[in-house]
């Protein structure tokens, strides 16, 4: 079977475009599947941010693992992913460091194609260490608003600050800054507060700080150790009390004998 797939610009990986919504609507299911399969899933070094080194990678992975662990229990339909090629209708590919898609659901994807998923990212985080600062601090503020991404957060590890933007009206497509409240930036999409602590992006649910999986294991180990110590203390007290009762009984018998 020969598929008639509308062409789009694919001269270079950074200029790959998804079909427009109109073109997608006109396709058959086999044509759509062929288009999705043809969209590159690999991301080159400069797009992925790998040129920013270990500090960027570690911060991004920690934030992703924290959110993935949290929403696995809190909202399994919240899709969290990092450095995934994301295709909006008729637009060049974007590759956010971290993004959240409400209602995206579980599942493994190679790419996120908005027309296929019928869902678009609503929260994006870019972690800034080195590289093109203007891309995250200026260009993405315009681009992500035009793409209809509801909230855009920047973790600037060099300047030790969080910058946050929210889209009050998608039809206008202009971000407004999110102001900090008691040092925290509210991410309405996530239902969490975002802060920068000790060079890491941390998330709070009320007064509770979310832990990444490694911290959860450590906390569980500490709790088990504490429980073991308490049990040993209780056993030691019980033994002391038993010895004390034995000594008292012995003293009473000796007194009776006298």
Image (cartoon, rainbow, N blue to C red):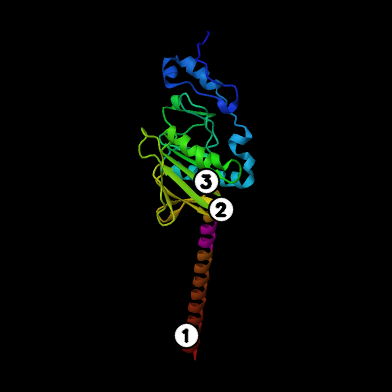
Chief secondary structure of the magenta span? helix
Q: For the residues carrying marks 1 and 3, which lies nearer the camera in this image?
A: 3
**Location of residue 18 in the rendering, given as x and y in whole percent from the top left corner:** 50, 23
Q: Is residue 133 above or below residue 112?
A: below
Find out whether residue 224 is within the magenta segment: yes
From the viewer's perspective, tell me whether residue 172 is left or right of residue 48: left
Q: Are marks 1 and 2 in contact (CB under 8 Å)?
A: no
From the viewer's perspective, tell me whether residue 73 is left or right of residue 8: left
Give the spatial CA distance, label 2 vs label 3: 12 Å
Quarter of the image holding residue 121?
top left
Q: Residue at x 54, y 60 (%)?
A: 225
Question: SS class of the residue under badge 2?
Answer: loop
Q: Residue at x 52, y 68 (%)?
A: 233
Find out whether residue 240 is within the magenta segment: no
**Location of residue 198 in the rendering, given as x and y in whole percent from the top left corner:** 55, 56
Q: How many labels does the image show?
A: 3
The residue closer to the viewer here, 219 or 201, is 201
The residue that disc 3 covers is 63
Q: Tell me which numbered mark, 2 or 3, is placed earlier along the sequence.
A: 3
The residue that disc 2 covers is 199
Question: What is the magenta range?
Answer: 221-228
From the viewer's perspective, tell me whether residue 203 is left or right of residue 48: left
The residue closer to the viewer here, 204 or 130, is 130
Question: SS class of the residue under badge 1?
Answer: helix
Give the spatial CA distance, label 1 vs label 2: 67 Å
Q: Tell me which numbered mark, 1 or 3, is placed earlier along the sequence.
A: 3
Q: For the residues carrying marks 1 and 2, which lies nearer the camera in this image?
A: 2
Q: Do the residues labelled 2 and 3 touch (CB within 8 Å)?
A: no
Q: Which residue is drawn at 51% across and 64% down?
A: 231
The residue that disc 1 covers is 252
Classed neighbour count for the residue bearing mark 2: other residues with Cα under 10 Å, few (<14), some (14–19), many (≥20): some
């Amino acid at each position: 079977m020969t598929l008639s797939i509308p062409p789009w610009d694919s001269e270079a990986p950074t200029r790959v475009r998804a079909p427009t919504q109109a073109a997608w609507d006109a396709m058959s299911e086999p044509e759509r599947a062929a288009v999705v399969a043809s969209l590159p899933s690999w991301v080159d070094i400069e797009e992925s941010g790998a040129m920013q080194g270990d500090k960027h990678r570690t911060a991004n992975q920690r934030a992703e693992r924290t959110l993935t662990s949290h929403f696995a229990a809190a909202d399994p339909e919240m899709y969290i992913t990092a450095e995934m090629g994301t295709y909006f209708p008729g637009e060049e590919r974007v590759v956010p460091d971290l993004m959240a898609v409400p209602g995206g659901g579980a599942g493994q994807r190679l790419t996120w194609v908005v027309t296929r998923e019928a869902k678009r990212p609503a929260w994006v985080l870019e972690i800034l260490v080195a590289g093109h600062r203007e891309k995250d601090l200026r260009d993405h503020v315009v681009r992500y608003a035009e793409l209809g991404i509801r909230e855009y957060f920047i973790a600037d590890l060099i300047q030790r600050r969080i910058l946050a933007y929210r889209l009050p009206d998608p039809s206008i497509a202009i971000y407004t800054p999110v102001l900090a409240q008691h040092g925290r930036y509210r991410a309405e999409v996530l239902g969490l507060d975002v802060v920068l602590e000790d060079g890491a992006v941390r998330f709070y649910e009320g007064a509770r700080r979310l832990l990444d999986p490694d911290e959860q294991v450590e906390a569980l180990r500490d709790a088990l150790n504490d429980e073991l110590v308490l049990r040993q203390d209780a056993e030691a007290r019980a033994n002391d009390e038993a010895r004390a009762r034995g000594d008292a009984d012995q003293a009473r018998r000796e007194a009776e004998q006298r």
